[in-house]
């Protein structure tokens, strides 16, 4: 099958947009859970870029392989991150990231 | 004799080591092990440590006399010499090479006699101290210091060069400090020790400058080199106004002090050192305070030996001194002035040791008077006689104080003349030896003091130091410099001052004797001195013998023993010294035509051309002696009249009438206070200024400003420490953006490698990811190619003094470009004529044998 | 750009991704955010299918949609009402907004830099060989070149599991003897102990 979709630029633009949305969301929202979900968005955007370029360089599967590992790591990261959120909630009774300021001067 | 010379040849006289090392070993053993060894062992060690050097000195002296006798009168002076080791090599200015300083010792007439005095009198005083300090807990420490002093003094005397003498000089200064402050528990004693040391140091500065000058003008510092060709080396003019600035130069010119000869300058600085060590004006202030030390110390150091080191030095440096009438007259005049000045202070003192201290200063003045007019033998003879009678006086005073202390436990009151009197009944031996020594010092005809003082007075009138005719004017450039001559009023003035000093000496010494030994004993009751009762309570803690006793109480009869004679260890030295004080005059009595000492010292001094005697001096000798006798008579007679016949009433009336003057003299003319206000006050002001600078500028500005800057920076940085992850992440993003921008833009950088000799240069561009390059090689501003290629470097060949402009344009993957320009210039040929380095290779092996530096034609300097 | 089925399919998936992302980022209620995330993930999976990455699509759905999002939902449910964002943006809004704006701007600039190059050198999709993106293809690479990372990822996952459990358990030792609160609360809040004194208990705890 050929010419199934747009050119690779479309994928890149989409991925860029997803990444930006995720990054802005991470920087702006103060809910810890929302921040974690934004991080997931960024990771997904990266995955998309990798797989898209793998479609262009068809000789190897490296892009998808790399993407595979990113997913594995992301899963581990989410698990630990949520455990941290729970721990934080236990101490501070909130999931407001502004409350995590013990490192303040 | 021949046998002896085989073992100890004259130029390698190893016995001198024996003389030097015994006291040193004694000091070390007593100092380190003394406490463990116990009293008797320390006594034995100390006495051996000085007895053996005395015997060795006697032996060496005998060898010297025999050797000198063989050489005959008028020849080069005999000298026993031994070399230790090479000390250091100093390079001389003006490319004169270098001189080797050696540690060597020598014994000739002058130093041999001095060594006999030091070890002989020293032995007697050591013996005396075994009884005087018997109850002191610091017994071993005392003898350690005393032995160390003897060692240093011997180094000073026997040193063959000025640096070795200086080592001894400093050593005796140190021991003086240690011994003055022996009872350092009391602050007064420690302060006296410090004062002595610091005043000495001021004089030592003069000595060091003199050493530098000697090295500069003379090139050597040992006695033999100094005396040879002294005239040609040291009679050179120095312009003092060079380098001191205009105003001071103008002042010097106005004072007539602009030009001096090197000999004068050296002489003045040496005399500064002597003034410090031998307590002349203006540096005499430490000697009276030094009486805070134990009496044997005062006898040994501050009467017989250390303070005479200055006179010894002047006599040693005679060959240089006689080249300068100015310096010699300064020495004589200051000596005479000091003699009179110190005598006036001695008139009013009540503490017997203080009277003796000022007497020492005064007698030292006499010695310098003698040496200053060129009569080195006379001055040195006075050193000899003074050692005997002054040591006897001090030891006698110590004996008296020892006896009084048993009765009055206050350290100051037991030395006060007002509580003494009539002690001749209780201490006969002390009394008679004191009489003998007093007779010597006042110049009773026939005693040693008479002969020595008389000789000095005579020479003050008849002797002067003058330069030979051809040396009186020196040339400096085109100017003629007339050196200062012996003033015509000099002899008369010096003689008058000397006679005045002799009269005053006779007066106050008789006053002292009468006050202590004649009349009735006044120490049964002690009148409380109100001002002292506040600080007397622990005054005797200083001696550590009678700690805990209370001081005298007003008007009541004191408990305590009657004053009694001292033990034999104290009276035997007194007797010996008293005997010598009377009869040692026979060693140098020109009046009686016997002068063995003169015979010994003559070879050293007789060929000094600068010393000129009046032609009629032989005649005057018999006339001027009556002045000396007259001085004795007047002085002693007046003292007897005032103090013995009239019980001191005229003196009291005088003090009441001229109470201001009396106060001033009693306060030692307030010289100490003057120094305190001016010199020390100035130093304290400097110290305060330094404190202010430290507090406000160093601490305030230099320490606080950076601290403030740091805390301000910290405050600013603290704003970024919010503790919130998002804020940090934002900064990460900002950094990321910056890095990304830098990476996204291309950067063109060029570097050049090449050398001027061959003219080949390589221009390289820094690599980058996806970079392509475009060059402009010939400097016309247009790129060689339109496309960007992968060429990263350029090879160039430049001619001499050619200049090329290279331009580079870089493009990266994103199509952005950046450019850079560089200018390369190949320098001209180097024809400057600077030193060229020629590497000299060994023909055979091909290795680098050496490097020769050839001067270029442009350099007209010296050949290497 | 030809409107083919592929094009429509791409657009649908892309819109799903974007909408889901926006919902995730903008929603107040975290459950809505989680569901938005789910939408994005499913959209991405669809795009993977379009890019002949069948294995990756499956993995995406199984792991991301099936585990990660579920985990998110669990935690949100556990937090209950407190998972909400209490108030609007407060302190240091400026810094975050600035960061966001800057990021977007820089992304735009990057795009601006890249676009001309891309225009000059287009990268078309070429015919993919058979088996591209299949399990066999990825698997063969995984167990040859990617073996070491694979093992390391295994280790990482074990560590993560253990760590997460350890972190989430909290201080379960030294249980204080107190009146038994509600079971969920007890599991959640851990032991009520004097050491926790000073921290307010959540609302609704009856003590």
Image (cartoon, rainbow, N blue to C red):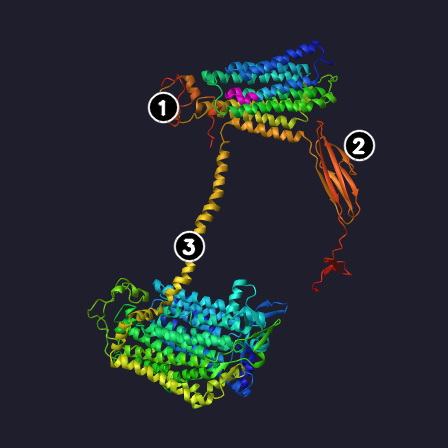
In front: C78, or B599? B599
Q: Chain of mark 2?
A: B
Q: Chain of mark 1?
A: C
Q: Position of residue C19 (x, y in %)?
A: 59, 13
Q: Position of residue B607 (x, y in %)?
A: 54, 83
Query: Taken as a whole, is the magenta stretch helix, strand or loop?
Result: helix
In front: B670, or B293? B670
Q: Chain of mark 3?
A: B
Determine whether, in the image, residue B466 is placed left or right of residue B546: right
Determine whether, in the image, residue B421 is placed left or right of residue A1: left
Q: Residue furthest front?
A: B254
Say whether residue B122 is visible: no
The secondary element bearing badge 2 is classed as loop
Q: Residues within 10 Å of mark 3 (few under 14, many from 20)?
A: few
Nearer to us of marks 3 and 1 is 3
Give the residue drawn at x 39%, y 62%: B677
Q: Which residue is mark 3?
A: B688
Q: Residue furthest left?
A: B556
Label number found at residue C114: none
Q: Which residues are magenta?
A: A24-35
Q: CA distance from mark 1 to mark 2?
A: 87 Å
Q: Is residue B394 magenta?
A: no
Q: Which residue is mark 1?
A: C177
Q: Which residue is mark 2?
A: B785
Q: Position of residue C148 (x, y in %)?
A: 64, 28
Tag 3–tag 2 contact (CB < 8 Å): no
**In terms of sequence position, does the residue under pointer 3 or pointer 2 come before the other?**
3
Say whether residue C163 is visible: yes
């Amino acid at each position: 099958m050929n010419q199934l979709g747009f050119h690779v630029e479309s994928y890149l633009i989409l991925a860029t947009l997803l990444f930006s949305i995720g990054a802005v969301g991470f920087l702006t929202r103060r809910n810890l859970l929302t921040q974690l979900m934004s991080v997931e968005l960024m990771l997904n955007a990266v995955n998309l870029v990798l797989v898209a370029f793998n479609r262009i360089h068809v000789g190897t599967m490296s892009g998808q392989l790399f993407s595979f590992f990113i997913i594995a790591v992301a899963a581990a990261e989410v698990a630990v991150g949520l455990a941290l959120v729970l721990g934080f909630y236990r101490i501070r009774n909130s999931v407001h990231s502004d409350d995590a300021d013990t490192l303040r001067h | 004799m021949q046998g002896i010379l085989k073992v100890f040849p004259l130029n390698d006289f190893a016995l001198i080591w024996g003389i030097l090392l015994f006291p040193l070993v004694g000091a070390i053993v007593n100092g380190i092990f003394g406490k463990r060894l116990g009293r008797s062992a320390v006594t034995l060690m100390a006495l051996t440590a000085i007895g053996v050097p005395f015997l060795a000195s006697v032996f060496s002296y005998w060898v010297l006399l025999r050797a000198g006798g063989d050489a005959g009168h008028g020849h080069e002076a005999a000298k026993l010499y031994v070399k230790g080791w090479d000390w250091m090599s100093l390079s001389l200015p003006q490319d004169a090479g270098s001189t080797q300083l050696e540690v060597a010792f020598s014994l000739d007439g002058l130093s041999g006699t001095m060594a006999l005095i030091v070890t002989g009198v020293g032995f007697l005083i050591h013996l005396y101290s075994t009884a005087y300090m018997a109850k002191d807990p610091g017994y071993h420490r005392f003898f350690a210091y005393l032995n160390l002093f003897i060692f240093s003094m011997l180094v000073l005397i026997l040193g063959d060069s000025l640096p070795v003498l200086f080592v001894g000089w400093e050593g005796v200064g140190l021991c003086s400090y240690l011994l003055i402050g022996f009872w350092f528990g009391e602050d007064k004693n420690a302060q006296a020790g410090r004062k002595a040391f610091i005043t000495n140091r001021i004089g030592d500065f003069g000595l060091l400058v003199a050493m530098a000058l000697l090295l500069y003008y003379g090139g050597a510092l040992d006695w033999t080199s100094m005396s040879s060709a002294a005239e040609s080396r040291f009679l050179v003019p120095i312009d003092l106004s060079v380098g001191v600035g205009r105003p001071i130069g103008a002042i010097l010119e106005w004072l007539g002090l602009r030009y001096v000869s090197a000999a004068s300058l050296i002489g003045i600085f040496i005399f500064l050192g002597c003034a410090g060590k031998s307590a002349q004006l203006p540096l005499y202030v430490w000697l009276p305070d030094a009486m805070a030390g134990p009496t044997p110390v005062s006898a040994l150091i501050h009467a017989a030996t250390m303070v005479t080191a200055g006179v010894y030095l002047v006599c040693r440096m005679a060959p240089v001194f006689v080249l300068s009438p100015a310096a010699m007259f300064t020495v004589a005049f200051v000596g005479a002035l000091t003699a009179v000045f110190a005598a006036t202070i001695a008139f009013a003192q009540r503490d017997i040791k203080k009277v003796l201290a000022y007497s020492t200063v005064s007698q030292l003045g006499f010695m310098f008077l003698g040496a200053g007019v060129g009569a080195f033998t006379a001055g040195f003879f006075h050193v000899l006689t003074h050692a005997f009678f002054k040591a006897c006086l001090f030891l006698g005073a110590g004996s008296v104080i020892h006896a009084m202390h048993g009765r009055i436990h206050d350290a100051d009151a037991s030395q006060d003349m007002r509580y003494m009197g009539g002690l001749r009944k209780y201490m006969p031996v002390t009394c008679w030896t004191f009489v003998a020594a007093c007779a010597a010092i006042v110049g009773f005809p026939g005693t040693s003091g008479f002969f020595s003082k008389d000789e000095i007075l005579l020479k003050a009138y008849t002797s002067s130091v003058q330069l030979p005719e051809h040396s009186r004017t020196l040339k400096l450039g085109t100017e003629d410099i007339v050196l200062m001559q012996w003033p015509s009023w000099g002899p008369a003035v010096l003689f008058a001052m000397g006679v005045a000093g002799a009269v005053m000496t006779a007066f106050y010494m008789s006053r002292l004797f009468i006050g202590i030994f004649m009349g009735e004993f006044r120490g049964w009751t002690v009148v409380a001195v109100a001002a002292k009762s506040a600080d007397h309570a622990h005054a005797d803690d200083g001696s550590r013998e009678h700690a805990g006793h209370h001081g005298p109480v007003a008007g009541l009869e004191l408990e305590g023993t009657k004053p009694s004679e001292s033990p034999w260890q104290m009276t035997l030295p007194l007797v010996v010294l008293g005997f010598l004080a009377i009869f040692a005059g026979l060693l140098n009595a020109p009046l009686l035509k016997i002068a063995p000492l003169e015979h010994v010292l003559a070879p050293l001094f007789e060929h000094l051309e600068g010393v000129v005697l009046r032609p009629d001096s032989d005649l005057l000798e018999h006339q001027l002696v009556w002045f000396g006798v007259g001085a004795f008579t007047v002085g002693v007679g007046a003292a007897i009249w005032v103090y013995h016949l009239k019980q001191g009433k005229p003196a009291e009336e005088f003090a009441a009438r001229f109470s201001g003057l009396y106060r001033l003299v009693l306060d030692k003319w307030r010289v100490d206070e003057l120094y305190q206000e001016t010199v020390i006050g100035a130093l304290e002001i400097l110290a305060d200024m330094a404190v202010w600078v430290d507090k406000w500028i160093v601490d305030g500005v230099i320490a606080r400003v950076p601290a403030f800057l740091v805390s301000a920076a910290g405050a600013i940085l603290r704003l970024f420490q919010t503790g919130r992850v998002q804020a940090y992440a934002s900064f990460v993003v900002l950094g990321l953006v910056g890095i990304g921008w830098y990476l996204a833009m291309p950067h063109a950088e060029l570097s050049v490698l090449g050398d001027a000799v061959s003219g080949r240069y390589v221009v390289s561009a820094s690599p980058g990811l996806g970079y392509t390059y475009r060059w402009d090689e010939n400097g016309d501003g247009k790129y060689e190619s339109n496309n960007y290629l992968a060429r990263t470097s350029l090879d160039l060949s430049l001619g001499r003094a050619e200049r090329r402009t290279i331009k580079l344009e870089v493009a990266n993957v994103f199509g952005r470009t950046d450019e850079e320009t560089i200018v390369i210039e190949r320098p001209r040929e180097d024809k400057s004529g600077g030193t060229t380095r020629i590497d000299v290779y060994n023909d055979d092996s091909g290795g680098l044998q050496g490097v020769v530096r050839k001067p270029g034609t442009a350099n007209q300097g010296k050949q290497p | 750009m030809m409107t083919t089925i592929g094009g429509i399919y791409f657009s649908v998936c892309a819109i799903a991704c974007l909408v889901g992302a926006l919902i995730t980022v903008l929603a107040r209620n975290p459950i809505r955010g989680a569901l938005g995330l789910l939408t994005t993930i499913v959209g991405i999976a669809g795009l993977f299918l379009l890019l002949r990455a069948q294995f990756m699509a499956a993995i995406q759905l199984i792991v991301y949609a099936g585990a990660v999002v579920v985990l998110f939902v669990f935690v949100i449910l556990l937090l209950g009402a407190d998972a909400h964002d209490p108030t609007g943006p407060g302190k240091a809004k400026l810094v975050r907004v600035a960061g966001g704006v800057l990021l977007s701007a820089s992304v735009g600039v990057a795009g601006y830099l890249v676009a001309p190059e891309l225009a000059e050198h287009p990268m078309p999709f070429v015919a993919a060989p058979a088996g591209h993106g299949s399990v066999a293809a990825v698997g063969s690479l995984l167990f040859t070149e990617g073996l070491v990372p694979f093992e390391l990822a295994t280790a990482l996952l074990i560590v993560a599991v253990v760590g997460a459990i350890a972190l989430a358990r909290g201080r379960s030792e030294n249980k204080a003897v107190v009146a038994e609160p509600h079971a969920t609360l007890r599991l959640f809040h851990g032991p009520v102990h004097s050491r926790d004194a000073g921290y307010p208990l959540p609302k609704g705890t009856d003590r």
